[in-house]
Every structure is written in structure tokens, then in C-alpha cells.
Image (cartoon, grey):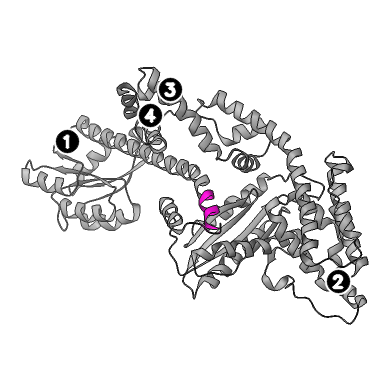
Amino acid sequence: MYKVFLIEDEIVIREALERMIPWNEYGFELVGKAKDGEIALPMIRKTKPDVLITDIKMPFMDGLTLSGIVKKEIPEIRIVIVSGYDDFEYARKAIALGVDDYLLKPIAKADFVRVLQKIQKDFEEKGKQQDYYEKFEQEIKKYENHSRRDFFELLVTKHADLPEIYDRAEKLSIDIMAESYNLVFFSLAESRDTDTIDQEYSQRAADVQKQIDDTLQKEKNLYMFRNQTFSYVLLLTGDAENIQAHTEHCVKLLQGILEKDQSGLEWIVCASKPVERLSQMPDCYKEGMQLFAYRYFGYSHVISQDMVPMGESQSRDNEIKDLVSVDSNVVNPAIFQNFLCNGLENEVAGFVENYLQMVGESALKSKMFRQYILLNIHFCIVSFLQKLGYEKDVVDHSLLEASGMGKPLDHDKIAASISGALKQAIQLREEKSKGKYQNVLQNAVQYMEENFADENLTLNTVACVANVSANHFSAMFSQKMGQTFIEYLTSLRMNRAKELLRCTDKRSGEIALEVGYKDSHYFSFLFKKTQGCTPSEYRNQGAVS
């Protein structure tokens, strides 16, 4: 219902106008009436009507004066002037104020209905247009997700070209100019045991993630990117004196949302140290990721620098004291089981470095303890790969060889042995899961290729066909296909549209329907956005060639 406010100084005419129109039948609701502009103005400010119908000649405040005030305060309001004066000057002033129509008394019902129906139609068209633009903005936001991911990878890559970073940031409407920068990392997922290889992303996690998205959108100087399949990173920008406070605020914001969740989701939040230059972002990312890797060691939900080992060796009087000082958690097989299930190959170096810092250089000088540590890791890997269906003979034996050496190994050799074995195990894990993922993606892609013309085709629909959760499917699709779901779907539709434009004489509206867009304007807008020209321009190019 569109709200109408009526102003007429003669009570007989006011009541006649009120009775003349069956307001509800035409989609309107009469929310107020008054005898002059002075009385009406505070009532209008309170009710905020969509349509104002006002007499032009009234005591205290006339219709033109009132219309001018109301139009400034409620620009989208539609105004109809009612007057007994057939005077061009009145009409000219009314038009200048942005009045929609000008009715002369006595008013015929047919004329009144015509004006109201025209206003109603305009409102509906405007509503459709607004829905269209909102949909387009959402679509483009989804479409640009992959571009944002590429930008972030460029930002945290050493020797990145700064002019290219600035150029990409401008295209993505990211204000990258600041005195200081920092990164905040977080991940959340369904609780899992360490025997589960494939991490699932449940609807509960998706709901919490949406809450985080909605909250962070209200924050200034903050941009969120997908970091890995199930983790995210926030890029913070700001002044040098407030970047640390900004960082702490974001960590507490995330912590507050995640702590309220009572469904048992696993989550971690940590932050790097602020830097002053974009060229320092790779170091900022590396430091943050090394801290983030402590999630595999059973650390609490919020990880800070003062909670983890600093990596400095401490002198001991003898070997026994060195071993007594070792954290018993370092021999917990769950640490490596967790990492083998969920870690990525590019995380291995940071994980191993963190682990060796936890063990301590002095303790590793003990041949007995070093053998125990290396053998423990070796058999964790063997057990893990056997659960995947591999035979023992595929396992890298470098850890066994290193554990049998009589002389002490230096830090780098120990790290290299552990890293090599872990990387091989992760590669084997990926090979095993590749077949499963490949089948899921093949089914999904085939379904999309057969049904892309269905305007109701969504990520949820395809995820259901693939028999995985929507969020898990979205992350997996982006990672394995190199583009987002919406990018791939749009590409299928645009390729078919181009084929129809080249090979048929169908109108743009017909083609839009045939490729999955019921709104031809939206189709044309998206075609130009993705192809660089309108459908008609594309067709003309083909005709010329």
C-alpha cells in the first residue's frame, strides 16, 4: 500500500475527495488529512506519505509553499496539486517544484483515478528498477570475489609490482592508500576429529560467517578476503597511531561473535604486527600465517604473540634438565594428525618452524629424544596414509634415516626432513581426495551445462545435486576451478547468448529468457559488464565481419 496525505481547506470538498476514491482497491492508504499546510506539515513529517494531494490556495501556508518544503525533506514523494484556478503561473510554479500533476476543480473521478494509477505504475516501475540494481550489485559483488582473491595474493607476494597493486585496488574500489596496514586472520568450521580428512563446512558455520560478513560491512578501513579454503583474512588500513587499536577492535569484534555461538564450532583468530609500507605486506602475511599455524597445536581461540614460544634456545646444565623443560604437548600425535588432515603444502614450513620452536633447540641435541620425536612423526604419517588406503612402501623414509644418525642434526636438517615427509603425505592426500572432488565437480559442472538456462539455478541447487553443503561447494569450486560459481555460470550463459546473437535473428529479450534471465535489461547490463559491449553492438560486429 502506498500512503496518501490529503490537504483541502474546504471540509465539504475534502470529504468528497476522501469518499470519491476506494483507496485500497487502487493500492493506496489514506494516512492523514488536514485543512491547511501549517497543520499538515508536522503530520506529514511523522507519517512520511508516498503521495501528497494538496489544494493550492489555503490560509496560513499555501500548497506551493508546503510542496517546496516537503519536496526538500522527502525528495521521492509524489505531489498532486488540486486547484480552482486555471492559471498558467500557478502551473509553472508547480512544475518548477517538481509537482507530478495539476488537477482543476471540480475534479472528475475518472481524472483522479487516472492520476493515481499513473503514480502507482511509476512506483512499481521504480521498485522493479531498484530491485534490478540491487540484484546487479549483489551479482557483481559475487562476480568480483575471485578478482579480490587475485588482488590479495598479489598484495602478499614478495617483489609484487606496486603500480599494479594500486591499479587493481582502484578497479576493485579498495582504498589502499594509508599510513599503516595490518592483517587479522580467522577460521571457523564444524568440530571434527583428527581422523576426518575432508573438512566439512556446515550450515551452522555458514550462518555464523554471514553474521560476521554483516558485522564487518559496517566497519571502515577494513577489507575481507578468502585466505584458504576455510579461512579468511582482514586487511586493515589506518593511521600509524591507531592501527593497533583498530587491530584489537577487529579481534574483539570477531571474538565476540564467535564466543556467542553455542553450536560447538571450532574457530581461531590472530593478528600480525602492523607495517608502514605496502611493500612490507608479504612479511606481515608471513608472520601472521606463522602465528595462525599454531591452531594445529591446540592453542586457545585467540592466539597472540605472547602465547607462543619465541624460539630462543636456553642454556641448560645437562641433558636431563633440557628434557624436563620440554612441553609434553610436543609428543601428542594429534598435532600431526590434525595438520595432516587439514594443513596445506604452503603451510608446512611455518608449521614445522613453530613445532621446532616448541620443542626447543637444546632438547633436540639429545639423540634419544631426537629419535623419539622423528619416529613419532614418521609413524603418525604412516598411520595417516594407511587410513587413506596407501601401502607402507609409499612413505618417505627420510625421517627414519635422520633418526638413526648418531651425530646431532642442525636445525635446518631436522626441519628439512620433517618438511619433506609432511609435504609428501599432503600431496598423497590431495591425490586421494582429487578423485572424490573431481567426481563432485564433474557432476556439478555437467548439471550447470545442462541447466544454465534455468533462471532459478543457484549455488544451493547445484550443491544439493553434488551432495555437499553450499558453503563447502562454493569454496571447493573456487579452489579447484579457478573461478567462482557465479563467474562460471555467467560464462556459460554469455557464451550461449553470443552464439544466439551470431546465428539467429532473435531479439535481445528472447535471448535473455533463453539463457536464464527473465529481465532483458538486466541481461543487457550484465552482457556489457562481462563482454565489454551491448548485445546489439556484439551482433553488429559479427555482421560487419
Give the answer, above or below, for where 362 lies relative to 66.
below
Q: Which residue is mark 4?
A: 520
Q: Is residue 371 magenta?
A: no
Earlier in the chain: of badge 1 and badge 2, it is 1
Circle on res. 61: none
Q: Earlier in the sequence, mark 1 or mark 3?
A: 1
The vertical placement of 260 against 392, above or below, is below
Residue that badge 1 annotates: 107
The residue range painted magenta reads: 149-160
In three-dimensional space, the C-alpha distance between marks 1 and 2, rounded to whole angstroms, equals 98 Å
CA–CA distance in space, label 1 to label 3: 56 Å
Residue type (three-letter) at the residue carrying disc 1: Ile
Which structural element holds mark 4? helix
Label 4 vs label 1, nearer the camera: 4
Question: On the image, numbered disc 2 is attached to which residue?
Answer: 363
The secondary structure type at the circle numbered 2 is helix
Look at 60% across and 36% down and name the residue there.
Answer: 460
Nearest the eye: 447 or 323? 323
Q: Please rate how many residues cluster around mark 1, counting C-alpha atoms within 10 Å: few if below 14, some from 14 to 19, many from 20.
A: some
